[in-house]
Amino acid sequence: MDDRALSKEISYALRHAPWEYELEMDEEGAVPVVQLLDALHRSTKWKNVSEEDFARIIAQSDKKRFELKDGKIRAYYGHSIPMKIKKERQMPPDILYHGTARRFLTSIKEKGLLPQNRQYVHLSQDVETAANVGSRHDAKPCILVIDAKVAWSDGVGFYLGNEKVWLADAVPPKYIREGK
Ligand code: HQG
């Protein structure tokens, strides 16, 4: 089985287009595993997919993208669907990081970090994770350092995605500086 392709398909279904798969999503973004399996089984490519395949992808992935729990599966982060996924506000660490492309810097300095096509801004717990995120947009990504605790104290919403990915509402420029 092509685990990477399956992971991408699940990401697409859970983050961006649950209606294409006729999934009933709860407020935290979780859907019944049987519903997702039913939908996938309709395509020849995924006709043999099982819950064990989901479990293996989750266990073997370098990124913690999905949670399987109580017969449901959800994406921890990345959503773009109109229904806002409910997240608990949580106090962030003092500093978080954001890896991005050089070409976005002028705009980010002016407007701050915006969720763009997603529901939340995505921040990283450590520099290495941020560098990985940034490398998706630029061969030489830049790392932004976010004064998360100060922003939180000033009322900016932060939410836990997984252990390495934090979510936030828009982050104004004053909490953002360029890393080395
Ligand atoms: C940029 C992946 C101009 C922002 C990753 C980013 C992550 C601005 C891009 C997760 C801006 C959006 C999310 C502004 C933000 N002006 N550009 N004011 N504000 N931007 O892909 O954070 O592999 O939607 O810097 O690893 O790169 O899919 O967000 O470059 O965890 O599981 O707008 O997705 O995870 O890009 O990545 P994205 P992201 P997966």
Image (cartoon, helix red, strand yellow):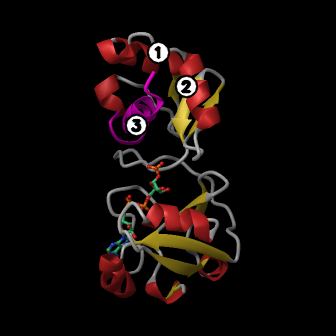
Q: Residue furthest front?
A: 139
Residue at 64% across / 33% down in the picture?
A: 59
In percent of width and height, residue 147 lies at: 60, 82
Position of residue 88 relative to residue 95, above or below, is above
| Residue ID for mark 1 | 49
Labels 1 & 2 near each other (Cβ < 8 A): yes
Say which quarter of the image contains residue 47: top left
| Residue ID for mark 3 | 8
Dot 2 or dot 3: first in sequence order is: 3
Position of residue 78 relative to residue 151, above or below, is above
Amino acid found under the numbered disc labelled 1: Val
In percent of width and height, residue 55 lies at: 61, 26
Dominant SS in magenta: helix
Amino acid found under the numbered disc labelled 3: Lys
Task: Give me the C-alpha separation between circle 1 and circle 2.
Answer: 8 Å
Dot 3 or dot 1: first in sequence order is: 3
Res. 54 mark? 2
In percent of width and height, residue 36 lies at: 44, 21
User: Magenta region: which residues?
Assistant: 1-17
Q: Residues within 10 Å of mark 1 (few under 14, many from 20)?
A: some
Secondary element under disc 1, as helix, strand or loop, is: loop
Say which quarter of the image contains residue 28: top right
Amino acid found under the numbered disc labelled 2: Phe
Residue 121 in view of the camera:
no
Q: Give the total number of marks visible in the rendering.
A: 3
Task: Give me the C-alpha separation between circle 3 and circle 1.
Answer: 14 Å
